[in-house]
Image: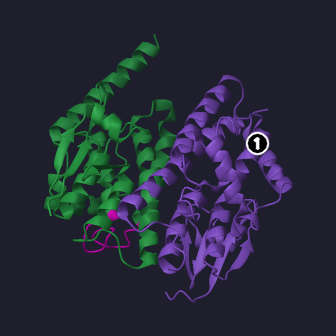
Amino acid sequence: MSEEVKVFGFWCSPFSRRVELALKLKGVQYEYIEEDVFKNKSPLLLKYNPVHKKIPVLLHNGKPIAESLVILEYIEETWKANPILPEDPYEKAMVRFWTKFADEKCLPALWKAGWSPENEREKAVDEACECLKTLESALKGKRFFGGETVGLVDIAANFIAFWLRLIQEATGQELLSAEKFPDLFKWTDEFGSCSVVKESLPPRDKLLAFFKARVAEAMDAQTNASK
Amino acid sequence: MAAGENVKLLGTRQSMFTQRVVWALKLKGIEYEFIEEDLVNKSSLLLRLNPVHKKVPVLVHGGKSIIESKIILEYIDETWKETSLLPQHPQDRAYVRFWAAFIDDKLMEASKKAFVSTGDDQVKAIESTVEALQLLEEELHGKRFFGGDQEIGFLDIVAGWIAYWFQFIEEVGGFKVMDSTKFPCLDSWTKSFLQVPSIEQNLPPPDELRNVFGAIRSSMCPK
């Protein structure tokens, strides 16, 4: 049966990369459509996600699904190869809990810590490190959050494995170090070295340049503000 | 874990999130022990079972704890198969999950802001609340419940706070957006939802909610 699968995404968004990673893990062929999210969202995107007007959107046989975590659960229920969720309801609940934690607590805390102005930085960094410590406890010495294979929590935490390192490089901050978070740091290497994961990451240099430009913009804004 | 094993629920009667779990358990006819928590003086049991967030509700089944109300609802649906709360088809499941996230993120955030703020901030927050309610109103159009015409489901349970808690949020917060002319479908849904026996028999008394919201508002608003 031929299926039409499309992903509307943005090259540097960890959210649309999550969707691509899940599809690749399950061997699902899809067409990728790059959206110009800052300047010119397409009429199709606005039609398929009128509520949030955001990427990612998955289109399956003409029907749209929005919100990356909702899309990931849909992908899991539709394509059964290489499951990213366990079968047991309790184990599934735990995976959903950690996925939500990574997405709703870790990601915003890390983003805030990466970009916060000097006077707010210490507090933001402390909060981000608390999140990382808590998330690390979910690894429990396993290779991946999903055990021997990449699972939903790993996919949801993709930002930590790749985007965070480049933000750290661009801003000169170190939030996730091998000394402070040995297990989590090791996980970023394991995750990042999977061939399927590598295929679903943005180009390193381009993303680093993007973050460096953001750092420069933020510094200009601060200089102007203090004039 | 077998479905027949011992079930406990840690929560508070006034918590909209705890009540979601109560409704789900009642709808499925599951016996459970309710443990009322004092959120000012959290018990060592609660802190042990939910060390990350230290919040209610917590469902304990066969000695294992499950947290976060929407996650608990999905767990209940997967463990006790009678009277399904979520639809079967992945497309429909994605639909209810999307709107559940919308209700808990967009609508709840806007309502909270409207509840604690004053002046221009409140005006903006009220606008956002109305926009969010408008979208839900459109989704309900023509249906008796979010779950369809016959029975309530996962999305009705998640939206349940709108049918009952919201009026007290408005009252204590000093604003009014819900009315039957602007939101006829939500108004009609509210009436049908509150008539479902498992819901009707499991709602906290109005004064308790007024007290709780009053206390929350006092603690959050700058004097």
Q: Nearer the viewer, residue B6 or B53?
A: B6
Q: Nearer the viewer, residue B140 or A44?
A: B140
Chain shown purple: that is B
Q: What residue do we see at 82% from left, 49% from top?
A: B210
Q: Nearer the viewer, residue A14 or B21?
A: B21
Label 1, residues with CA under 10 Å away: few <14, some 14-19, many ≥20: some
Task: Label the magenta part by its dominant secondary structure.
Answer: loop
Query: Going by the image, does A33 lie left or right of A67?
Result: left
**Amino acid at the residue labelled 1:** Arg
Query: Going by the image, does B23 lie left or right of A20?
Result: right
- Residue A107, percent across and down? 41, 48
Magenta region, residue range: A137-152
In which image quadrant can residue B83 be found?
Answer: bottom right
Q: What residue do we see at 60% from left, 54% from top?
A: B159
Q: Tell me the residue that label 1 is attached to.
A: B217
- Residue A177, percent across and down? 33, 53
Identify the element where label 1 is drawn. helix
Let me know if residue A140 is in the magenta part.
yes
**Residue at mark 1: chain:** B
Q: What residue do we see at 55% from left, 55% from top?
A: B146
Whether residue A73 is visible, yes or no, is no
Chain A rendered in what hue?
Answer: green
Residue at the farthest top position: A227
